[in-house]
């Protein structure tokens, strides 16, 4: 490990506070036998499952379920006809159920301030989660997983004005999160936090393409040398940590007379609070720009950041240090997503969802990293000015 002062202090604090990160080779995704989902929902929530489908995921197990309209759960006044999402936590998080308490607290904080988030359904006992024993593959080995249900979701359409709307939503969310505190986030971090980029070096063995590997190692080094030394200058705060197209809920803007496939969407809510940390504001924006760039099909991917920033600056601000590191942070998140996608597929070849970013992500990463920072910023600020 490179003996950078900031990196060294962070590692020491993580160890002191008992923070445990996933290690290479460690499997934390739960193994769920056939028939488990309807049995859990019936016994815990008093609902009869008619259909269920596993949703894409990295470490947890998520299921979209449709249920019969009858229930004996006294805490469900009306059965949701569109279905629910059942989440079965991974083995690491299920050992610290306070993570669910913290996630529900931040979701309620946002809802109280006009930001739509998933809403938990109480089980028969009036609890938001339950710790259960599940036997994997019938071999008698016990694992414990928490579960809770939230109303189901949709995805986002990607157009320049939509990028602006997404940036504006991120700014509004950051404004709403000011003043939020939960003691869990005083020490919590995840392998997916951008502050953990140096640890990514332990997983880069899965990158077999030489040119990809060169760029990946170069970006990790750049993050260590250019971003970490500025940590004390960056704006701190609670961040979502995973603002991507699959975690954003959208609705079609009313009054559009153009063809349906070209209509602009606005943001109605956000899902998945498993990567929330007390970190640096700019990380959220970098993560957002990263995934919006990957999804971009209609404009040059190098212009996406300009539209997102224009929306963000309509209701929030970045300081000079935030702006200075943004370029490297976007590249770091692209790298993180690509490397961890390859690693997760290496550990579980049947999980092809984790390769989603890689389909268009590698070309985006190379194009993004090859452009000079000054040239990229000039494009972005010109776009920002065009909205004024």
Image: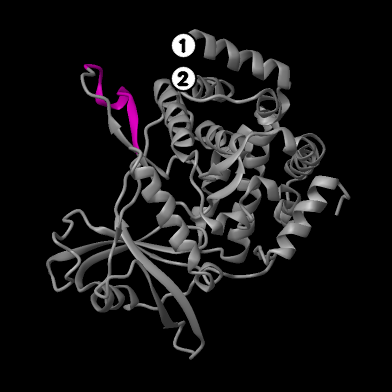
Residue 277 higher or lower than 317, as above or below: below
Residue at numbered disc 2: 314
Q: Closest to the observer: 299 or 107?
A: 107
Verify whether residue 333 appears in magenta. Answer: no
Q: Residue furthest left?
A: 70
Residue 79's spot in the image, x, y percent?
A: 15, 60
Residue 387, numbered circle: 1
Q: Are marks 2 and 1 in contact (CB under 8 Å)?
A: yes
Residue at the image position 57 percent from the left and 55 percent from the top: 185
Q: Position of residue 387 (x, y in %)?
A: 46, 11
> Which residue is outermost to the right?
3
Residue at image position (51%, 56%) is: 352
Q: Is residue 387 left or right of residue 342?
A: left
Q: Residue 228 occupies which quadrant of the picture?
A: top right
Q: Position of residue 208 (x, y in %)?
A: 73, 51
Which residue is at a point 31% across and 76% down the rendered structure image?
40
Left or right for 213, reference 267: right
Return the disc, 2 or 1, that comes first in the chain's sequence.
Answer: 2
Residue 263 lies within the magenta run: yes
Q: Which residues are magenta?
A: 257-268
**What is the distance, in whole Å, between disc 2 and disc 1 at their CAs?**
9 Å
Which residue ends up furthest to the bottom in the rendered image?
A: 140
**Corner quadrant of residue 335:** top right
Q: Nearer the viewer, residue 47 or 276?
A: 276
Quarter containing the N terminus: bottom right
Mark 1 element type: helix
Please name which of the two marks, 2 or 1, marks the residue nearer to the observer. 2
Query: Residue 359, position in %: x, y?
Result: 55, 42
From where the camera sits, is residue 104 visible? yes
């Amino acid at each position: 490990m490179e003996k950078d002062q900031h990196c060294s202090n962070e590692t020491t604090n993580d160890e002191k506070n008992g923070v445990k990160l996933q290690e290479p080779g460690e499997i934390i995704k739960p193994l769920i036998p056939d028939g488990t989902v309807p049995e859990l929902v019936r016994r815990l929530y008093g609902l009869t499952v008619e259909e269920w489908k596993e949703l894409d995921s990295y470490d947890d197990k998520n299921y979209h379920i449709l249920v019969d309209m009858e229930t004996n759960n006294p805490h469900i006044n009306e059965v949701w006809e569109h279905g629910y999402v059942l989440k079965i936590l991974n083995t690491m998080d299920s050992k610290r159920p306070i993570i669910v308490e913290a996630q529900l607290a931040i979701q309620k904080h946002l809802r109280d301030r006009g930001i739509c988030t998933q809403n938990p359904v109480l089980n028969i006992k009036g609890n938001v989660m339950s710790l259960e024993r599940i036997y994997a593959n019938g071999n008698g080995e016990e694992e414990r997983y928490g579960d809770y249900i939230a109303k189901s979701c949709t995805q986002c359409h990607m157009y320049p004005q939509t990028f602006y709307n997404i940036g504006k939503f991120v700014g509004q969310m950051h404004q709403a999160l000011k003043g939020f505190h939960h003691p869990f986030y005083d020490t919590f971090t995840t392998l997916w936090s951008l502050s953990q980029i140096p640890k990514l070096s332990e997983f880069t063995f899965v990158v077999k393409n030489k040119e990809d590997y060169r760029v990946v190692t170069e970006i990790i080094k750049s993050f260590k040398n250019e971003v970490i030394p500025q940590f004390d200058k960056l704006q701190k705060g609670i961040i979502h940590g995973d603002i991507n197209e699959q975690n954003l809920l959208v609705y079609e803007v009313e009054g559009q007379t153009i063809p349906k496939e070209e209509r602009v969407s606005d943001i109605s809510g956000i899902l998945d609070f498993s990567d929330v940390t007390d970190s640096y504001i700019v990380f959220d924006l970098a993560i957002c720009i990263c995934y919006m760039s990957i999804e971009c099909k209609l404009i040059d991917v190098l212009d996406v950041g300009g539209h997102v920033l224009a929306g963000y600056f309509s209701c929030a601000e970045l300081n000079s240090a935030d702006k200075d590191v943004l370029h490297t942070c976007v590249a770091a998140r692209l790298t993180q997503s690509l490397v961890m996608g390859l690693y997760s597929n290496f550990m579980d070849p049947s999980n092809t969802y984790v390769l989603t970013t890689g389909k268009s992500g590698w070309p985006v990463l190379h194009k993004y990293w090859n452009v000079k920072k000054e040239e990229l910023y000039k494009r972005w600020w010109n776009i920002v000015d065009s909205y004024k």
